Amino acid sequence: MLRVSLFLVLLMFALAFSVPVPYVVVRPSSTLDTLGENEGRPVVEISGPARVYPTTGRLLLTTVGVGARGERHHLGSLLRAWWDTDKAVVPKESVYPDGKSGQQVLEANLRDMNKAQDNATVAALAYLGMSTEQAKPTFHTGRVGGPSAGLFLALGIVDKLSGQDLTGGRTIAGTGAIDADGRVRRIGGLPMKLLAAKRDQATVFVLPRAECGEADRAGNGGLRLVPVETLAGAVDALKALGTGGKVPSC
């Protein structure tokens, strides 16, 4: 009886470490500097008669990398990822819903990015009191998808068209979806984005105020967290960083 029980335990243990489970691993991915270039072209390029000012520092939009739909994990590999602070484990269904293929998810994410670019343009130009007749932003973000780049695309536009030097020479990272009216919305993947920001030498991280709880749980990693609710609030917070004024905190 003991031998049978031991055999069953060993069999269950072997199955647990060999049978695929429906989870994927999420990692910190690249950052894009909305004041800089991507593949030789400005991430935020301004055309039209409006003056484009020189900028300093970096405004890094942060991204996460997600395992492919066909990526196979068993309990052993997931346990290693769970223990690795540079990775997270999420249900595959949360990334690839309704049985969608990797290509379908990529296409949906790129559509979300296009919408984020449109919202960033409308919000930034409205903040500046300008129109697309004076300035027309275009974006070179490659295959980065999703809505969460919107805030930093808008900040890139504002910095280039206002001459306010929002960074003060700093490397400032962050994330946040944005509506056309300039409201900043919550996003996903914050812990991995904080890691990406720290890896790329950011000292400040701008995030939706609604994400402060998640940031507290993840830990700031030495980054100064600056929560915002609107594009105008984000601009004010960055200017306050440069002047020693009051800066919002989580």
Image (spheres, rainbow, N blue to C red):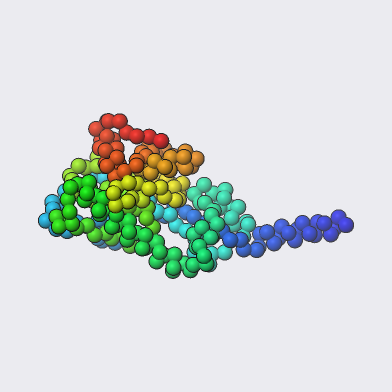
Estimate the x, y position of residue 154 in percent, counting from the top left. 27, 50
Considering every residue shown, the one lying at the far left of the view is 49
Q: Quadrant of residue 239?
A: top left
State whether residue 160 is above or below residue 238. Answer: below
Q: Quadrant of residue 237?
A: top left
Residue 49 relative to residue 15: left or right: left
Residue at 62% x, 56% y: name it. Answer: 76
Residue 14 relative to residue 91: left or right: right
Residue at 53% x, 54% y: name it. Answer: 90
State whether residue 226 is above or below residue 38. Answer: above
Estimate the x, y position of residue 4 in percent, counting from the top left. 84, 59
Seen from the viewer's position, the closer of residues 82 and 92 is 92
The number of numbered discs placed on residues in the rendered structure image is: 0
- The answer to whether one can see residue 31 in this image is no
Q: The C terminus lies in which quarter of the figure?
A: top left
Considering every residue shown, the one lying at the far top of the view is 245
Considering every residue shown, the one lying at the far right of the view is 1
Residue at 17% x, 50% y: name it. Answer: 130
